[in-house]
Amino acid sequence: MFFTPMDSPTHSDDEEIAPKNLQKPATDDNFLNVLQTLPSLSEKEIDEYKNKARLLVNQSYELLTSNEWQKLNTTSAGDVVSVLSNDYGKILKIEGVIDAPAIELVDRLYNNIEDMPSWNKDVSLVKKIETINLNTDIIYQSTKTYGGGLIGPRDFITLRHRNKCGNYYMTSGISVKIDLPHRKNHVRGENGIVCFAAEKIENDGDNNNENKCHVTWILHANLNIWLPQRVIDKSLASTLEKMMGSVRYYVYQSFDTTG
């Protein structure tokens, strides 16, 4: 999940951040036309993306199993929010239990990514723009205004990869650069790494555990906005909390977990 703040009370981040040597931002209609007419990837590009995807699995697993996370708080839903700081900045994660089988949850979120706006009201559009193989693709995603106007429309171009590593079924992502114009009224954000991972919950006498999983959501995003870091951190933590709620809503609406 991927969010970046927009206008500050005193100036427009679009004016400050948008590259000055690019063509005029595309209107929504023109932008959607461009998305639908992107050229096919070359064999060299496909190989490069496959290599990035393999590295992404290792990077995600290292974050999932790191002992350097520091707990920030527990949400009202019982989810735990933590932070890890490294040379690239702060990385956030949230952990909780979802009432769905681990592998099915990850597969549905990966395969049906374009349906996300129907269950996550902060997301306005998701489109698969390149398919590399069954478990690897590139998506375009845009978000709505958020956070009382401090966080506004952003868009992201993300390489995604689905895999199983250790006990984790996961889908991971990282921003990539492709020849895509900037979209009007949107600021292009960057995902350093994002990861949604689900683990089976071992049977502890509860027969319903097979329909539950432990979920970890990791977010490392460049917000491209002139705001105090504490405001950005709070916004991202709130994004993670809301995303967990959205996933639970999605499961409630579309999964049969009655056994």
Image (tube, rainbow, N blue to C red):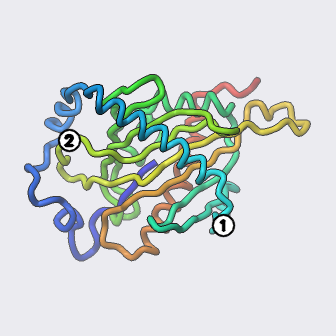
Q: Nearer the viewer, residue 249 or 106?
A: 106
Residue 180 badge: 2
> Is 10 placed above or below 128 here?
below
Name the image quarter holding residue 169. Answer: top right
Marks 1 and 2: in contact by CB < 8 Å? no
Total residue callouts: 2
Q: Which of 199 and 28 is in front in this view?
A: 199
Residue behind mark 1? 71
Q: For marks 2 and 1, give the CA distance.
A: 38 Å
Q: State the quadrant of the C terminus.
A: top right
Please report the residue visible at 31 percent of the width from the left and 67 percent of the height from the top.
225
Side of 77 relative to 206 (left or right): left
Report crowding for label 1: few under 14, some 14 to 19, many 20 or more residues within 10 A (C-alpha): some
Name the amino acid, label 2.
Answer: Leu
Q: Which of 19 and 48 is in front in this view?
A: 48
Side of 171 relative to 192 (left or right): right
Q: Where residue 147 sits in the image (x, y, percent)?
A: 40, 62
> Is 156 placed above or below 93 here?
above
Name the amino acid, label 1.
Answer: Lys
Name the image quarter holding residue 214. Answer: top right
User: SS of the residue at dot 2?
Assistant: loop
Q: Where residue 186 sits in the image (x, y, percent)?
A: 24, 52
User: SS of the residue at dot 1?
Assistant: strand
Name the image quarter holding residue 207. Answer: top right
Side of 148 relative to 100 (left or right): left
Q: From this viewpoint, which residue is outermost toward the right?
A: 205
Side of 65 relative to 17 (left or right): right
